[in-house]
Amino acid sequence: MSAATTSVPADARPSGRPLTANRLPKWTPPAVAAGSIALGCGIGAVGGLESKLQWGLISAILFVVISYVLSAQVEGRRQAKDRLATSVVWVAFILAVIPLLALTFYTVQQGAKVVDGNFLSHSMRGVRASGPGGGIYHALIGTLQQVFLASLMAAPIGLLTAVYLVEYGRGKLAKAVTFFVDVMTGVPSIVAGLFILSVWNLALGFNYSGFSGSLALAILMLPVVVRSTEEMLKLVPNELREASYALGVPKWKTILRIVIPTAIGGITTGVMLAVARITGETAPVMLLVFGADYINNNPFDGPQQSLPMYIWMQYSQVNNQYGYARAWGAALVLIAFVMGLNLIARGIARWRSPKAGH
């Protein structure tokens, strides 16, 4: 019995370019980028556009268009669509990185002129606002104390809330807690400051202090801690819980000895990122801490200063070169502090990762 042979109709055969079609050289994207920048700058100069931002946007559009056209002519339309998506991603990445690098470079350039030992170890007590001298020592102490107190309140509450939502939460109560956590995530910082001002200062009669600001910062920090901790706890494999239950370990001890230690790296990272988020808040501090030009080591009594408010107070002085310089110096210290917290968070996450064996 002979094998039957079938013929494929011509109209049923795959059409278009084969998968092994021609490819553009690897140097094509950099060459297209350089040509697009040169062409964009030329168009901007000839067109009389003064803004370099407009030149950059024209160059970005030309890069995307030229990359797509070249790829469509050489590689085919399917590969051209892939290059189009890649080009858009690269352009979006560059547009996001350039402002960040420009901001960091300008802050370092302006702030490095005044940041020294004297600037970090002196306050503004007895210093004229329009004159030279002074420092951020009082603001640095206030920021550290306020952020520490806020973390001391928000971190345990956020951790316990996340444990409840993941391990115990069922029904309407858990849904209500999740809903309000989501709502708190989008609450403006000024609203948290007004709430603490109305309840803590006006209704209960407490004075302005660093602790009042810490209460508002804790409200802003709490939803970030809850959300990040909740996601980390969900990543813990259920097999670990089941193995612990099979050995007769109670649920609360399983959570305490198995679940939380397993996710501690991610939990710590989330807490550190939440701390970095509240460090630069200004509105609650302006309402509740009130600001001071002297060193106040007691956050529970009297006004205090903080770095964000210090920056605003110094920069709000019109035509004051010394105030501007101090503001940029404080901004550099604040950015370095936040950057340090992020690096610590990344280091803890890497150290506690499964690949590290901890």
Image (tube, grey):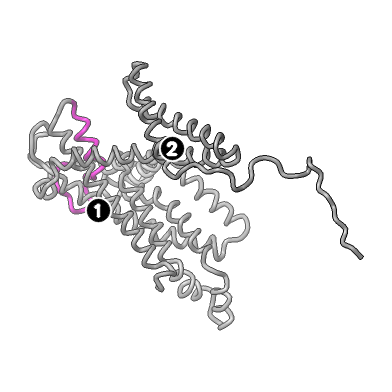
Between the C-alphas of marks 1 and 2, the distance is: 39 Å
Front residue (pair 236, 226): 236
Dot label at residue 91: 2
- The residue nearer to you, when weighing 356 against 111, is 356
Instruction: State the residue at coordinates (48%, 54%).
Output: 227
Rate crowding at label 1 as few (under 14), some (14 to 19) or many (20 or more) other CA atoms within 10 Å: some
> Mark 2: which amino acid?
Val
Q: Residue at x 50, y 59 (%)?
A: 230
Where does the magenta region start and end?
Answer: 293-318
Residue at image mark 1 = 144
Q: Is residue 43 visible?
A: yes
Dot 1 amino acid type: Leu
* Mark earlier in primary sequence (1, 2): 2
In the displayed structure, 26 sits above or below 264; it is above
Asked whether residue 303 is in view, the answer is no
| Residue 150 figure quarter | bottom left
Residue 96 percent location from the top left of the image: 39, 39
Q: Position of residue 219 (x, y in %)?
A: 40, 49
Outermost residue, bottom side: 247
Query: What secondary structure predominates along the stretch shown in magenta?
Result: loop
Position of 60 relative to 272 (above/below):
above
- Above or below for 305 versus 354: above
Looking at the image, which is closer to me, 98 or 275? Answer: 98
In percent of width and height, residue 148 lies at 29, 56
Q: Nearer the viewer, mark 1 or mark 2?
A: 2
Q: Which quarter of the figure is the C terminus placed in?
A: bottom left
Give SS at disc 1. Answer: helix
Residue 357 spot, x, y in % from top left = 41, 73
- Asked whether 278 falls inside the magenta stretch, the response is no
Q: Is residue 71 above or below residue 142?
A: above
Q: Quadrant of residue 170?
A: bottom right
